[in-house]
Image: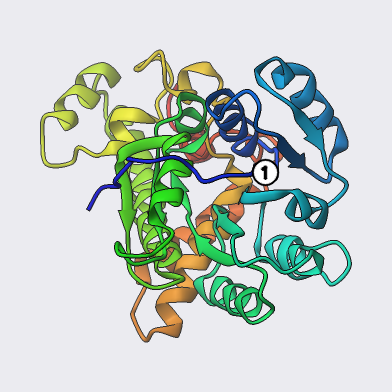
Amino acid sequence: MAANTNGNAGQGAFGFVGLGAMGYPMASHIRRKIPATTPFYVFDLNTAFCEQFAAEFSSHGPVHVAKSARDVAEHASTIVSIVTASPHVRSVYLDETSGVVAAAPSSDRLMLECSTIDFETTREIGKALAEAGRGTYVDTPVSGGVPGAVAGNLAFLIGAEESASFRQRLDAAVGMMGSPEKVFYMGALGNGLGAKLTNNYCAGIINLVTAEALNFGIRAGIDKHALVNAIKCSTGNSFMLEKVCPVPGVDPAAPSSNDYERGFKMFMMPKDIGLAVDMAEKLGARATTGKAALELYKEAASDPKIRDKDASSVYRFLGGPE
């Protein structure tokens, strides 16, 4: 069920941890949309990102560069974070010196964790913060990639019940970064990440299958434009083909037509597929296709020519005609 966006995001300052490719535009939407008098605290291990953000967005209201996640938590009642992997999330929240857990107790603190990590870790962190009286931690992973973050139309998968007491505040916060009709409550803590990993498993495999199929189809002599258009109108169509066509020169807006720049970087793909495969195995489910895709993505992510390119560059890795 989609979110209810009535109300505001609660009183007090906002904070944001992680100003990377996703976090920077997400944070910019918050700073633009919260009241101009509301303080906004940002932290990233790369201080230059924070300074750049402050210089760019202070005209919309006060931006304070924090010294740590703890510093953010000492000032902000609503915190959003998005970092690379489970160890980084643990550090942000549970480091006894610089993490949120080191800040003063607060039952009003609402923490929205948007990183893609394993659902077990997020449950451990949420439990530890609750037991320490540091507030409410919710897994709120996003889907839509960098384009969605820039456009402010991300999807949010929420690890909480629809009836959660903090829902109004959460809806208002994520509504500044995403589309209200794409905010989904998945049940218990960790379920948001479970849903995200399930989605990533589908997207990653479909991305690879699409690249493989177009590779041999075009090698057979079929015009690339005709082939893509035919598949789009047939049972092989997918979001990945429509939005991230891996063949250069077919869709001018796709990363492939821009030397595979922008989008979800290849070196991140093994992590996301690996998390999904691990989840399946721990739950006793078979992930045969995912295991095969994981090995191929590991190879591609080791190629210096494409590791920093969009994941659709797997088509180039496979030797697809360009």
Q: Is residue 8 left or right of residue 199?
A: right
Residue depicted at 39% across the width and 31% down the height: 244
Can you give x and y, in whole percent of width and height, for residue 320 in the image?
44, 32
Q: Is residue 35 left or right of residue 227?
A: right
Residue depicted at 30% across the width and 62% down the height: 162
When the figure is inspected, residue 252 is found, relative to residue 105, above or below; the finding is above
| Quarter location, residue 298 | bottom right
Rendering colour mode: rainbow
Task: Identify the secondary structure beneath mark 1.
Answer: strand
Q: Say few, some or many: other residues with alpha carbon within 10 Å of mark 1 (under 14 / 14 to 19 / 20 or more).
A: many
Can you give x and y, in whole percent of width and height, for residue 250 in the image?
34, 17
When the figure is inspected, residue 184 is found, relative to residue 11, above or below; the finding is below
Can you give x and y, in whole percent of width and height, for residue 204 in the image?
41, 51
Q: Is residue 9 left or right of residue 99?
A: left
Residue depicted at 37% across the width and 53% down the height: 205
Circle count: 1
Residue depicted at 66% across the width and 59% down the height: 85
Indicate the amino acid at tag 1. Answer: Phe
- Residue that label 1 marks: 16
Quadrant for the C terminus in the image: top left
The residue positioned farthest toward the left in the image shown = 234
Can you give x and y, in whole percent of width and height, for residue 80 in the image?
60, 48
When the figure is inspected, residue 311 is found, relative to residue 222, above or below; the finding is below
